[in-house]
Amino acid sequence: MASGSNVAPVIIKRKKVVVEDGHHGGAWKVAYADFVTAMMAFFMLMWLLNATTEKQRKGIADYFSPVAPISRMSSGSDDMFMGDSVFAADVLPQMGVGANSLHETDGDASGGDNKTDPEADAQTDAFSEVKEVLLALGGESLLEDEWLRHVVSEITDEGLVLEFHDTAEAALFENGAEATDLLRSIAYAVLEAAALLPNDMAVEAHVATVPVVQKTDPTWDLSSDRAFKLADVLQGFGLPSDRIRRVTAYGDREPVVDNLMAARNNRLVIIFLRH
């Protein structure tokens, strides 16, 4: 340093940091606990899938997929594990798993002392006869060929299920919930079939997902309006109102094809309920 300089010397101190072995925290314990919890949930899920029937799994799924019962005759709730409405099979006592004393299912043959009931067999035969008449399975049909493309039918534990759906070429409704001539023609044919059965009926409506996200989901109101419109059309053709046990709107919650906006998801369901 030059003599006579007024600049103070710069002193640099170097601190040596010694890293010693010691406690590194418990973050790994939290991660491990989360992993064990996830594995436990996974194995519980695998066990439930193996221990339950298809009908029970559908009931659990339906519990997390709400619907809108819109008829005073509807209870507004389904049995969580059985997946049936309280009106199904007249709410008979359950025998075994998923069956009751009147109607058995294939998966419940080992459920206990289930016995075939002659009345149940007679109803199934009656349902089959009506199905044959409607769909021309026996030759002559109440439905014209162009209408048959809109109709799907099956016999279930709940009763005879008739489903009517839109196609790309023709729709059951126009301008929202105005019944087309196609729907009225199909409904009239169903009414003629209803004369062959004394069973009460349930009406359901499903709609496709709307392509634009809106503040209020319009599918619930639309399916409700369509369900009531079908009930009104049937009653206008002479069906006694007390034969319609329930009217239910499903919105867009139960699509039948992967494309949620497809016309096939616009459908109506009429169920001739078992006694």
Image (cartoon, rainbow, N blue to C red):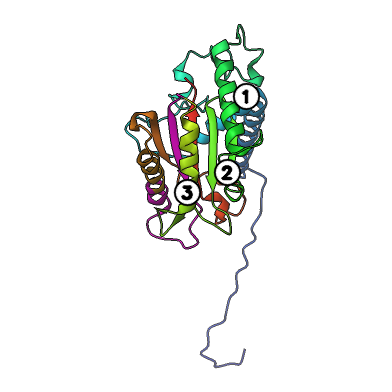
Identify whether 187 is placed above or below 196. Answer: below
**SS for dot 2:** strand
Instruction: Give me the C-alpha separation between circle 2 and circle 1.
Output: 32 Å
Q: Which class describes the residues within 10 Å of circle 2: few (<14), some (14-19), or many (20+)?
A: some
User: Residue 271: which numbered mark, if any?
Assistant: none
Q: Amino acid at mark 3?
A: Leu
Residue 221 x/y as whole percent: 37, 50
Residue 91 x/y as whole percent: 45, 18
Identify whether 262 is placed above or below 273. Answer: below
Q: Which residue is tagged 1? A: 52
Instruction: Give me the C-alpha separation between circle 3 and circle 1.
Output: 39 Å
Q: Which of the two residues, 139 or 37, is positioned nearer the viewer here?
A: 139
Residue 208 lies in the magenta-colored region: yes
User: Residue sitting at 50 percent across and 40 percent down?
Assistant: 189
Q: Which residue is tagged 3? A: 183
- Camera-nearest label, 2 or 1: 2
* Cβ atoms at labels 2 and 1 below 8 Å apart: no
Q: Which of the two residues, 268 or 112, is positioned nearer the viewer here?
A: 268
Q: Which class describes the residues within 10 Å of circle 3: few (<14), some (14-19), or many (20+)?
A: many
Q: Which residue is tagged 2? A: 151
Q: Which class describes the residues within 10 Å of circle 1: few (<14), some (14-19), or many (20+)?
A: some
Is residue 64 visible in the rendered image? The answer is: no
Identify whether 139 is placed above or below 145. Answer: above
- Mark 3 or 1, nearer chain start: 1
- Camera-nearest label, 3 or 1: 3
**SS for dot 3:** helix
User: Residue sitting at 57 percent across and 51 percent down?
Assistant: 264
Classify residue 131 as left or right of residue 195. Answer: right
Task: Look at the image and tell me in which quarter the N terminus lies.
Answer: bottom right
Magenta extent: 198-225
- Mark 3 or 2, nearer chain start: 2
Instruction: Give me the C-alpha separation between circle 3 and circle 2.
Output: 11 Å
